[in-house]
Image (tube, rainbow, N blue to C red):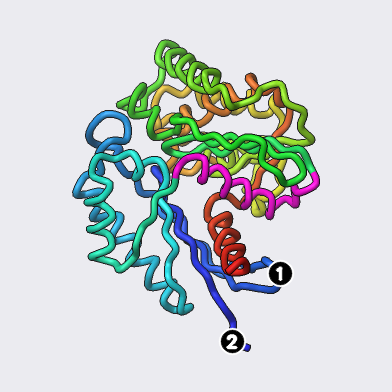
Amino acid sequence: MPKKYLSALDIGTNSFHLIIVEVLENHHFKIIDREREVIRLASHKGNGLSFITDEEIKNAIRVINKFKEIADKYGTEINAIATSVVRESENKDDFILKVYGATGVLIKTIEGSKEAELIYKGAEKALLLRDKKVLCIDIGGGSTEFIYARNGEIVFAESIKIGAVRLAKKFFPNFETNPSNLKECEDYITELISSNNKIQFNIDYDLVVGSSGTIQSAARMINFRHQNKEINFINGFKFTKNYFDEVSREIFSCVSPKERLKMKGLEQKRADVIPVGLLILKKVFELFNIHEIQVSEFALREGIILDLLENENSN
């Protein structure tokens, strides 16, 4: 029987992620290729994430064509899903048409609640969460997702317009921090999370799971601080609020991206927006009274694969 492959492309605000998987039996899959490119959309023009520039479209086409070559080798079409940056931009339709015309890849946009559900599916698969009460947090470039599930059933899945790139653009246009703009940004984060009446804060959970770039970056910096080496396997890595506070205080004390580059374990291309991501995570720790977070390597793209497999089986 020939092998079957599927691919998922997560078009985020800060980066594009591709995975190619080999489909196994009973909703299982094996990741056989994983590609990532840091590429920002809607970060140069307009308010918020309102406009994708021609240069950004050109970069997106270049990256997607490169990813398409990889998917073609496995004989699989790219299932491309775009999140907050594309769904919010004024020229969303123009972006999708131009990308399709130049690559043949049709980008679909999904709402924030669906994004949150797919993220949870990915995390549930990575950490075997089905029989647990779980709070799941995913901090992206454009938005942050909050999911609470009991025994595999989602109680709430919310997406809030706070992300590392979005808020860097709003509060730190030159990527330099000081006590004043950090406080202003933190207050804004608190207000947006607290004002969502679907999110429950005094919940009973067995564990808290974090996914995507900011939380993985925090884990890598914490690991380097205590082990003085790179971490090879991030899935399941745990860190406490105390360890997080040590690293975040050091990042917040660095005024410029150049200073932040001295932090061991921090990816160079994330040095400009990392203070914002850590501010969001700081407030998450406080608002939900979290003591420890466990990292999920799986997130939206793996959730897309699982969704595809479930839909195939139900048809």
Report the amino acid beneath label 1.
Asn
- Residue 64: image quadrant is bottom left
Residue furthest to the bottom in view is 1
Report the amino acid beneath label 2.
Pro
- Marks counted in the figure total 2
Please tell me which residue is depicted at 36% across the width and 57% down the height of the picture. Answer: 107
Task: Tell me the tag on residue 215.
Answer: none
Residue 97 screen position, x and y as percent: 24, 58
Q: Residue under circle 1?
A: 26
Foreground pick, 302 / 33: 302
The region drawn magenta spans 111-131
Magenta highlight: main SS: helix
Q: Residue under circle 2?
A: 2
- Whether residue 249 is situated above or below residue 273 in the rendered picture: above
Label 2 secondary element:
loop
- Residue 63: image quadrant is bottom left
Residue 246 screen position, x and y as percent: 63, 24
Please tell me which residue is depicted at 76% across the width and 49% down the height of the picture. Answer: 130
In this rendering, position of residue 22 left or right of residue 104? right
Residue furthest to the top in view is 180
Q: Earlier in the sequence, mark 1 or mark 2?
A: 2
- Whether residue 252 is situated above or below residue 90 in the rendered picture: above
Foreground pick, 96 / 67: 96
Residue furthest to the front in view is 315
Please tell me which residue is depicted at 19% across the width and 49% down the height of the picture. Answer: 54
Q: Are marks 1 and 2 in contact (CB under 8 Å)?
A: no
> What is the quadrant of the N terminus in the image?
bottom right
Residue 195 screen position, x and y as percent: 52, 18
Residue 219 screen position, x and y as percent: 63, 39
Q: Tell me the crowding category of disc 2: few under 14, some 14 to 19, or many 20 or more residues within 10 angstroms, Cα based.
A: few
Q: Tell me the crowding category of disc 1: few under 14, some 14 to 19, or many 20 or more residues within 10 angstroms, Cα based.
A: few
- Is residue 79 visible in this depiction of the protein? yes
